[in-house]
Image (tube, helix red, strand yellow):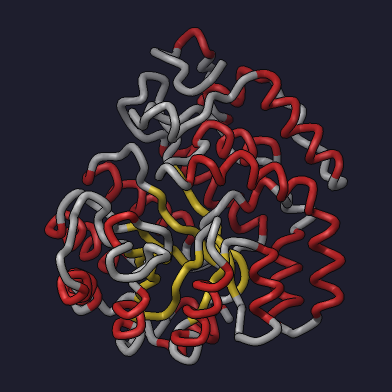
Amino acid sequence: MQSALSNPTRSKEWARECYKGVEGSTKASYTPDFRDIDEEGVRHDVRQSIRHGFFSTMCSGTGLELNERKRLVQIVCEESGGRLLVGVNVAQPSLDESLDLLDHAGRIGCSHAFVSFPRQLSPETQDEVYAYYRRIIEATDMGIVLYAYDAPNMRRFHPSGIPVDVFDRLADFDNVIAVKLTQPMNPAVAMELCERLSDRVLVGPASLEMAMLLARHYPVQWTGQWIVEGVQSPEKPYVVEMMNALASKRFDEALKIYWRLEPAYRLVHRLQQPLLLKGGHPWAHIRYFQWCVGGNGGLTRDTKHGKDQVSILDQAGREEIRDTYRRIWITPYDGPEDEFIVGRSNYARGVRPSDMTELPLYR
């Protein structure tokens, strides 16, 4: 496996062999004034992804300028050292910026890129959508992961908001290796995507329930790019074990693991689903989940999303997260709350909440 990871072919054959298991997500940690990336905090989270047993991590650049995104990817690639794959989310305000980030990521060692059509554009035809994706796909030999989600600007092409016909055409490119089925998703369109694409690309459901159902009929070998740390720890890697079982068609074993983690998975869904429908995420909660099982933690920048796209991490929310971990036999980290606020690496250097310029999305 290590030899395959160190010299991937960036092809469908390589993906079937190596793009398998659980993919995590690495986000930026920050200095106390939020003006710069805390490099050691990022490196800590890369090492934590390896401890979790993830096969890959996706660099999430939410809240970062283009040059900062490039630096985040550079740090993650350096720290991974070939021990796990590194992907990059290349969604940028313009196609030129996306291509710039894509080129940078390919040169420094990323294996794949996560691609979606800009939400702010209103294409008149599916050919316009296809042409946009094709520009990105043909600009790199990295693997391309398509993002299937309900986009209002795509509903003229398919009731689900997913450009299914476009994805069907794109699946023929050798370096289009996978499609992520986000949550929530109508089971009918999930089945349609599997029927039309799974013979050429790897289908990765973000919903574990969907993964179990689809795996009965289609090859399902990966999930990820969601709050996996919310339902497992390095010592109890439930999702990693569950995906291994599904890939091997050990359905009874997968189901037992699912019911073990289900209380925490239910909480993750309840926190995230309403925000996903609005194009947001529970950013502070994600950091707290990660910190509770060994991650760096630390508050993230205020992304300036609307109030319906983010949520505030308050005392009741923190207690519920910790209690839910205990319900699935994971003992959450019992460090001081101040350490979470500033991040482990900052805290070790003597930084305290009083040194922070703000406490975004935290109460």
**Image quarter in which the N terminus is found:** bottom right
Q: Is residue 345 visible?
A: no
- Snapshot quadrant of residue 136: bottom left
In this rendering, would 141 be left or right of 252?
A: left
Q: How many labels sit on residues?
A: 0
Relative image position of residue 202 (x, y in whole percent): 50, 80
Q: Residue at x 41, y 34 (%)?
A: 38
Farthest residue, direction top: 354
Farthest residue, direction left: 96
- Snapshot quadrant of residue 62: top left
Q: Residue at x 42, y 61 (%)?
A: 149
In this rendering, would 333 be left or right of 92?
A: right
Q: 299 above or below 208?
A: above
Of 220 and 49, which appears nearest the observer?
A: 220
- Snapshot quadrant of residue 295: top right
Q: Is residue 142 visible?
A: yes
Relative image position of residue 98 (x, y in whole percent): 21, 58
